[in-house]
Amino acid sequence: MQTINSIKEMQTFSNREMGEGKTIALVPTMGFFHPGHLSLMEEGRRRGDFLVVSIFVNPTQFGAGEDYEDYPRDMERDQKLAEETGVDVIFTPPVDEMYPSDYQTCVNVEEVTRNLCGISRPAHFRGVTTVVCKLFSIVKPSFAIFGEKDFQQLVAIRQMVSDLNIDVKIVGMPIYREEDGLALSSRNKYLTPDERKAALCLFRSLMRAKELFRQGERKTEEILSEVMSIIKAEQLAEIDYVKICDVKTLKDIEQINQETVLALAAKIGKTRLIDNIILNPSDCI
Amino acid sequence: MQTINSIKEMQTFSNREMGEGKTIALVPTMGFFHPGHLSLMEEGRRRGDFLVVSIFVNPTQFGAGEDYEDYPRDMERDQKLAEETGVDVIFTPPVDEMYPSDYQTCVNVEEVTRNLCGISRPAHFRGVTTVVCKLFSIVKPSFAIFGEKDFQQLVAIRQMVSDLNIDVKIVGMPIYREEDGLALSSRNKYLTPDERKAALCLFRSLMRAKELFRQGERKTEEILSEVMSIIKAEQLAEIDYVKICDVKTLKDIEQINQETVLALAAKIGKTRLIDNIILNPSDCI
């Protein structure tokens, strides 16, 4: 495994692999790997002849007062885990090469980024789509693997790729959960033991929603009110949003007649967590 | 020569050429070719193994009340001229394939697009950089050729390519002028014979600026006031702007100590024309 820091060097590397007829798979990450990341890498290894994992804590997707400075980093551990998982190249560019002093361009996906996290994190997705667009130009992957935990991010990236005609296949991978159901996230590291226990209310609320849905409930209002009451019963939890949206447009819907996502965000103590499940009427037939 | 309408087919074509180790040159145009366009194609032919010319009158770069509907089109004549100039592929996608109904992404270069034409055409450059980004993803050129008449467009595209790490070399080509000095533009077709004569005031004003500059004038105020008085003397002309800016940042400057562009826009009758010259102190040494 090789670690590449320079954008130019990464491009040269990718051009050479492509010139030899090899396909490249990319797993874009902010590092601090957990088994969820590793599952994306394993999928990348299955898809491409050559596997690149980028590690870049992207400042432009963090809002003022968010945790950019504190975001957990451990390059040595990440390199070891990546190597064990069969990664060929770790690409980890310095911030000032990604955003030089005269930097001034953004890629903005307008509609699917408005709802859900777009409300409380207004510049977040613009930062995400811009950096992913840059990473695609640098690494030139045929496949890029993203987790479904960041569901809105995945939808925004699919929309960007379709709108800008980027010739890459986007692969979404299921949420990786702890045994008790908590969705893996690098931010789980912030949780105290009490908060870790409290955070389970999110998964519990989603499981209750799924149960209601399986029993035939199709009114989002009914499902959401049960989900919210479960989370509100947990003292350490504070809801940002709980919504049921069309999986492609991410617009709120009232009655579940199509494939939808139940998405939620909540603070557990000071840590903001997100989670989601798919509710699809055709799964119930 | 081949004409390709489908985005997918163009991508497949480009992938095949690249797989055979060939480099692609792209000349993005809105068609209605004049010798200026042909000079870009000739440069493209010199640069790449394979030459693609796109013809797409891009609706998103026209403002409300601008000439999108009336913009001159003549595909048959363009195809003939392109074939004679050695073009390999004309790529001319339909509008609804470039912008399907759920389209929602834009690429915005923020600073260099604020001044000059960005003031009177606020959404223009966002439309340009977005469509050029799309064309780059579709055609995958190693070289892309643009004219220097649209100087701000060229600066914005260079900035986008640098910021988004797009692996393409941008080549700028000198303004192609009629014998009497009028810069070639597809929009010159709109001019009546009287307006055609009146339009010459633009070139005359630029030549006067160059003369003053060669004589040692470095105050932009002095140069601009002479340029403006020459244009104002022409009854059919109405100035939009006349400015002297740094060639890279396109910020106004007061004293010419670096390479600058004198850029202007004016309406001649109802037709908006632009023109520019470079004023570079190191050319005078």
Image (cartoon, coloured by chain):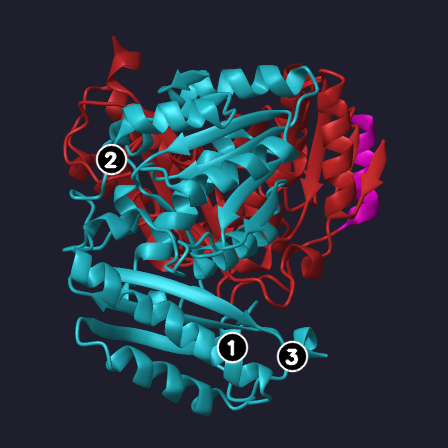
Chain colours: A red, B cyan
Vertical position of residue A167 compared to residue A127: above or below: above
SS at circle 1: helix
Q: Residue B111: where, in percent of width, then height? A: 47, 67
Instruction: Point out the stretch of residues depicted in magenta.
Output: A74-85
Residue at 52% x, 37% y is A183
- The kind of residue tagged 3 is Pro
Looking at the image, which residue sits at the far front? Answer: B179
Q: Are marks 2 and 3 in contact (CB under 8 Å)?
A: no
Vertical position of residue A107 compared to residue B29: above or below: below
Question: Which numbered circle lies on residue B210?
Answer: 1
Front-lying residue, B145 or A28: B145
CA gap, disc 2 and disc 3: 41 Å
Q: Is residue B233 left or right of residue B54?
A: left
Q: Is residue B109 left or right of residue A24?
A: left
Front-lying residue, A54 or A196: A54
Instruction: Please tell me in which quadrant of the rendered image residue B14 appears.
Output: top right
Residue A225 counted in the magenta span? no
- The kind of residue tagged 2 is Arg
Residue A198 seen in this snapshot: no
Residue at label 2? Answer: B73
- Mark 2 or 1, closer to the camera: 1
CA gap, disc 2 and disc 1: 35 Å
Q: State the quadrant of the C terminus of chain B.
A: bottom right
Residue at label 3? Answer: B281
Q: Residue B47: where, in percent of width, then height? A: 64, 35
Front-lying residue, A111 or A211: A111
Vertical position of residue B4 compared to residue A118: above or below: above
